[in-house]
Image (cartoon, rainbow, N blue to C red):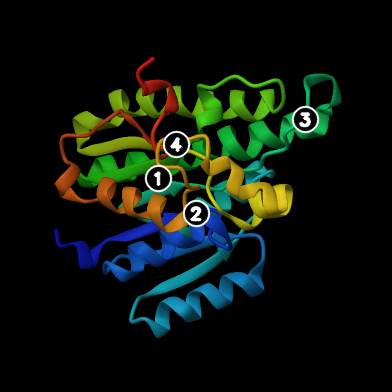
């Protein structure tokens, strides 16, 4: 099957990493089903992809609502690629994390990918091919005094990644995850302002990541060039400073 004939559902495409992933996949001949909550921004993305010669359509859904997640899967239909990118993050200490915030993190970051994989991966398996890419975060493996529920929701996504690889790989569906380090998005910029550049000082490269750099990793993972990579979490964080000698 040629790459040009493939279709991808990408969640959370109206900003940040998801938007960059949608643009990258479309630029490589993959038809994109772009998801988000903001219809206006979704329409703008579809127009941008079309202007660059790609093909895309937008489907709105609130991933907090399980019924809307399943409706998104129905609207997407048979896809060859699923990129679970949409996520919420609120970095608060445990005592300041409300029940609603806890439930929202688990619903969007963990349950929505679970439901989408449950709806779409079996159909990929029936056709004998497919790729699922989950966007995790370094918070899944790097404990911090704030954001415990965010880290927990992403850690759950990483074990799901490995579990799904064992479940669907025998039928030709590869499942991997990408764990970005701090990345320049509208969300991180709004949260940190001018201090955003300080995040880059914490990695070996010395600069913060860009959404397009993460999108390149996703593009690699959906291609046959990465056919020997399966059930893996690829860390894209500019280099762990603890690797330095001394």
For the residues carrying marks 2 and 1, which lies nearer the camera in this image? 2
Instruction: Write down the quadrant of residue 77 in the picture.
Output: bottom left
Do labels 1 and 4 touch, CB within 8 Å? Answer: yes
Q: Mark 1 packing: few (<14 Cα in 10 Å), some, or many (20+)?
A: many
Circle on res. 92? 3
Q: Which mark is residue 118?
A: 4
Residue mark closest to the camera, 3 vs 4: 3
Q: Earlier in the sequence, mark 2 or mark 4?
A: 2
From the top left corner, tell me how far across and down residue 37 is, in percent.
66, 60
Q: Residue at x 35, y 55 (%)?
A: 78
Q: Which mark is residue 120?
A: 1
The residue shown at (53%, 48%) is: 183
**Residue labelled with disc 2:** 17
Mark closest to the chain's N terminus, 3 or 4: 3
Q: Secondary structure at mark 3?
A: loop
Q: CA distance from mark 2 to mark 1?
A: 22 Å
Q: Is residue 3 left or right of residue 32?
A: left
Q: Give whichever of discs 2 and 3 has the lower sequence position.
A: 2
Quadrant of the image containing the C terminus: top left
Classed neighbour count for the residue bearing mark 2: other residues with Cα under 10 Å, few (<14), some (14–19), many (≥20): many
Quadrant of the frame with the N terminus: bottom left
């Amino acid at each position: 099957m040629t790459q040009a004939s493939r279709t991808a559902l990408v969640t959370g495409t109206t900003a940040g990493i998801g938007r960059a992933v949608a643009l990258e996949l479309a630029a490589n001949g993959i038809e994109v089903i772009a998801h988000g909550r903001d219809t206006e921004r979704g329409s703008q993305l579809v127009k941008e992809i079309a202007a660059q010669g790609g093909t895309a359509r937008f489907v709105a859904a609130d991933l907090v609502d399980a019924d809307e997640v399943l409706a998104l899967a129905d609207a997407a239909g048979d896809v060859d690629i699923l990129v679970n990118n949409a996520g919420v993050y609120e970095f608060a200490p445990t005592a300041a994390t409300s029940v609603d915030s806890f439930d929202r993190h688990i619903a969007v970051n963990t349950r929505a990918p679970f439901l989408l994989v449950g709806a779409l991966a079996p159909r990929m398996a029936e056709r004998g091919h497919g790729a699922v890419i989950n966007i995790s975060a370094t918070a899944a493996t790097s404990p911090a005094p704030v954001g415990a529920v965010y880290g927990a929701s992403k850690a759950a996504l990483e074990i799901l990644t490995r579990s799904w690889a064992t479940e669907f790989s025998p039928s030709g569906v590869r499942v991997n995850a990408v764990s970005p380090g701090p990345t320049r998005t509208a969300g991180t910029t709004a949260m940190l302002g001018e201090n955003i550049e300080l995040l880059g000082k914490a990695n070996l490269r010395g600069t913060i990541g860009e959404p397009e750099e993460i999108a390149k990793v996703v593009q690699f993972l959906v291609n046959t060039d990465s056919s020997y990579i399966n059930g893996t979490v690829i860390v894209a964080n500019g280099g762990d400073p603890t690797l330095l000698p001394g």
